[in-house]
Amino acid sequence: MLTGNGIAPPLHRRLLAEGMGTGLLVTVVVGSGIAAERLSPDDAGLQLLQNAFATLLGLTVLILLFGPVSGGYFNPVVSAADWWLGRRDGTGLTGSELGGYAVVQTVGGIAGAVLANLMFDVRIAELSSKSRGGWPLLLGELVATVGLVALIFALARTGRGAWSAPAVGAYIGAAYFFTSSTAFANPAVTVGRMFSDTFAGIAAASVPGFLGAQLLGGALGVLLVLALYPDAAATADDVVVPHEAGRPSPEGRPHD
């Protein structure tokens, strides 16, 4: 992953940004779900609207905050798609970077759920009991993930990566309502939400099906991107947002 002047930020900084970004994203999702459930206990539709709106805004802000350092992936499927598209052209994430990103994203997702539980005084020792099974929900996850991957790489390929923060936020906010699964579309977020027995949680038994649908959706999303933009690999370094960290110092050396 390169910056605008061809220099990658140090890996430890990128991993910190990805871990914190994913963790805070799960905190936003879970925390706003708990708040919505308490503010509107008798109106599930309003709860979902509040949860979606907070997630839309939170995701946009987090991409703007951490994206310039790490790219703002916050999602192992998006990270894997970036590696797959760029592997032959030497763009995007390397295999070792992908592994590191996936680990910190998943750990961050779990930590983010625990943080939300602590803020709202929810027991942290209980896994979610909220079942989210059945093929309609898995189809919803497939659709949500395909659209997310296609959107991100289309924006990068057409030179509109700077719009990724609001565009991705808007897409996820809308997908809360147009998909049956409420658009998790993210393995790290899915695993994290398993650790909160609240409105936004997901039971452990439902997680494997969601992960499978997300991985398949990511693969189909990559195929769709290649069908629309065969040379998409050339801009893999600009996913999710253009990276501007590591500018040269006055002495001509990049800052750490």
Image: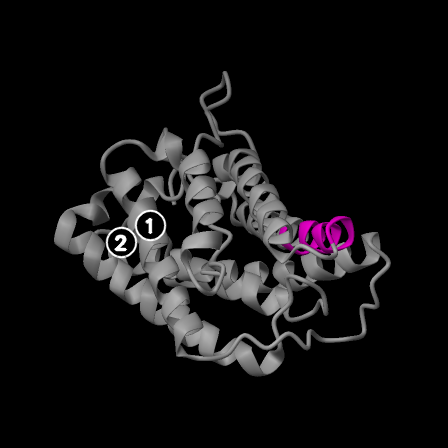
Residue sitting farthest toward the right: 121
Is 144 or 68 nearer to us in this picture? Answer: 144
Locate residue 85, reporting x and y percent. 25, 56
Q: Give the range drawn in magenta.
A: 29-40
223 in magenta: no
Q: Is mark 1 on a helix, strand or loop?
A: loop
Q: Quadrant of the C terminus?
A: top right
Q: Residues within 10 Å of mark 2 (few under 14, many from 20)?
A: many
Main secondary structure of the magenta stretch: helix
Occupied quadrant, residue 198: bottom right
Task: Give above or below for 13 relative to 215.
Answer: above
* In-image side of 76 versus 236 (left or right): right
Label count reads 2
Residue lying at 38% horizontally and 63% vertically, measured from the top left: 95
* Alpha carbons under labels 2 and 1: distance apart: 5 Å
Q: Do the residues labelled 2 and 1 touch (CB within 8 Å)?
A: yes
Residue sitting farthest toward the front: 42
Q: What residue type is labelled 1?
A: Gly
Q: Mark 1 points at which residue?
A: 92
Q: Quadrant of the N terminus?
A: top left
Q: Is mark 2 on a helix, strand or loop?
A: helix
Q: Name the residue under label 2.
A: 86
Q: Which amino acid does label 2 sit on?
A: Gly
Locate residue 218, reporting x and y percent. 33, 63
Q: Earlier in the sequence, mark 2 or mark 1?
A: 2
* In-image side of 157 versus 45 (left or right): left
Q: Which mark is residue 249?
A: none
In this rendering, does residue 71 appear at all?
no
Task: Give above or below for 102 relative to 82.
Answer: below
Is 88 or 172 nearer to us in this picture? Answer: 172
Locate residue 21, reporting x and y percent. 59, 47
